[in-house]
Image (cartoon, rainbow, N blue to C red):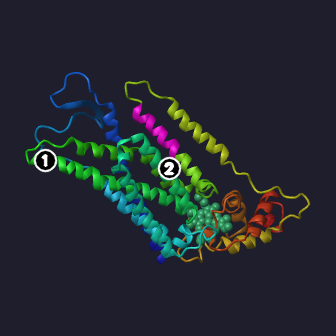
Amino acid sequence: MEAHLYEWANLLIRWLHITVGIAWIGASFYFNWLENHLQREGQKPPGVAGTLWAIHGGGFYYLQKYQVAPEQLPERLHWFKWEAYYTWMSGFLLLFVVYYLNAGTNLIDPSVAELSPLAASLIGISVLILSWLVYDGLCRSPLGRRPALLAAVGFILLVALAWGLSQIFSGRGAYIHVGAAIGTCMVANVFFVIIPGQRAMVDAMTAGREPDAARGLAGAQRSRHNNYLTLPVLFIMISNHFPGTYGSHWNWLILATLMAASMVIRHYFNIRHLPRPAKIALPLAGAAGLVVLIVLTKPSGPAPVEANLPPVPFSQVQSIVQERCAGCHAARPDFAGFATPPKGVRLDTPAQIRAHKTQIGQLAVTTSVMPPGNITRITDDERALLARWLQQGAEHNSENSQTE
Ligand code: HEC
C-alpha cells in the first residue's frame, strides 16, 4: 500500500514539475526570442526600443519594448515568477520523494561511498544552498563585470561539482544534484535578483522617480545565465533514462561534455540574429563534441571469454538473477518500496530473463547501474558469470532455455 502511494506521489509531483517547468522555460524562451527578433530600426514611438508583429492561434499581436520603462505605469502589469517558484518547489519535493526517501536505492552507492541516508540527504541539501551562495558571490564580485571570465570560472566550478558528487553519490544521484544545484541557482536568480530589481523599478515609478536602469541590467545578467543553464538542466532531468551516461566510470566528464556542447549550441541561437555574421562554427563545434562523446562512450564490453571455458548453465544465471534482481523485478516485488516491477521489467521467469538479456548486459555487466546502489550485493564473480553467459550466446545452455 505504502509503495502504491509512493508511486502515485512520484507520478503526480513529476507531472506537476514538468508542467510548471515547461510554463517557466517556455516563457523564458519566448522572451529571448522576442528580444532577438524585435524590429529596432525605423519609426517608433518615443522611448520605445523595438516593436514586433506576430500571428498566433488565429490572432494578430503587436508588441513594443521600452528602452527603460513607459512614461506611466500601466494599470495591469503581468509578472512572470510563479512558474519559476513552482518549478523549484515541485522539483525539490520530487528530489525528496525519489532520492531522500529512497536514498538507499537511488542516492547511495556503497561501492562509491558508505553513507547513511540522513547524511546523504543532508549533503544533497547543503550542495544546493552552497552552490547558490558561491555563484551569487561570484556574480557580485568584480568577476561579475567580466562575463566571459565569469562563464569560464562558473563552468569549471560546475564540472568540479559534478566530479565531487560522483565521488560520494551514485551516478544517478550525482547527476540529479548537479541539475538541482543549477535549477536552484536559476530560480534564486529570479527570486533574489530579477524580481526585486523589477520591483524596485516599479516602486520608483510609483513614487514618481526615474527607474534605475542598473537594476534592470543586474536582472538581465542573471537572466542571461539562466538562458545558458537551461539545456544542461533539461538534459539532467531526462538523464535517469540513460544509464550509459550516469552509470559510466567517467560520468562527470560525460556530463561536462554534454553541458559544454549544449551551451555552445545555445550561444549560437542567441547570436545568430545579430548583424555580425552568424558563427556557424559554434553549433559545429558543439556537434563535434557530441560525436566524440558518442565514440568514446562505446562500451568496451567484458573481456573476451576463454574458448575452453564450459558453457554457463542457465540455472546458474537464473539463480543469480533471482537472488539479486527479482526482489524488485517480479510481478509482485518483495522489495520494500516497490508495488510493481520498476519500468515494467520482470526478471522472474527464464523467458523474461532471456528477453531482457541485452539490457541485463548493459545495466549489470557493462555498467554497474543495476542493482541500484548494489543494494542486493551482487558480486564481481556473479557479474563475470553473467558476462560469460551473454558472450556464449545466452541461449544454448540448458534445457530450461529450450522449454521456456
Ligand atoms: C532495489 C530494486 C532493484 C533491484 C534489486 C534491481 N533493480 Fe533494476 N530497476 C530498479 C529501478 C528502480 C529501475 C528504474 C530506474 C529508473 O527510474 O529509470 C530499474 C530498471 C531496470 C531496467 C530497465 C531500465 C530501463 O531504463 O528501461 C532493467 C533492464 C533492470 N532494472 C535490470 C536489473 C537487473 C539485471 C538487476 C539485477 C542484476 C536489477 N535490475 C536489480 C530497481 C531494481
Using the image, determine if residue 153 lies above or below residue 17. above
Label 2 sits on what residue type?
A: Ile
Residue 338 visible in the displayed image: no
Q: Quadrant of the C terminus?
A: bottom right
Callout 2: 10 Å neighbours few (<14), some, many (20+)? few
Mark 1 — residue? 204
Q: Of 69 and 38, which appears nearest the observer?
A: 69
Using the image, determine if residue 294 lies above or below residue 190. above
Q: Which residues are magenta?
A: 259-271
Most common SS among magenta residues: helix
Pointer 1 with pointer 2, Cβ within 8 A = no
Q: Of 76 and 162, which appears nearest the observer?
A: 162
- Percent of width and height locating residue 121: 47, 71
Residue 192 location, quadrant = bottom left
Tell me if the residue at label 2 has its CB under 8 Å from ligand 1.
no
- Percent of width and height locating residue 245: 59, 53
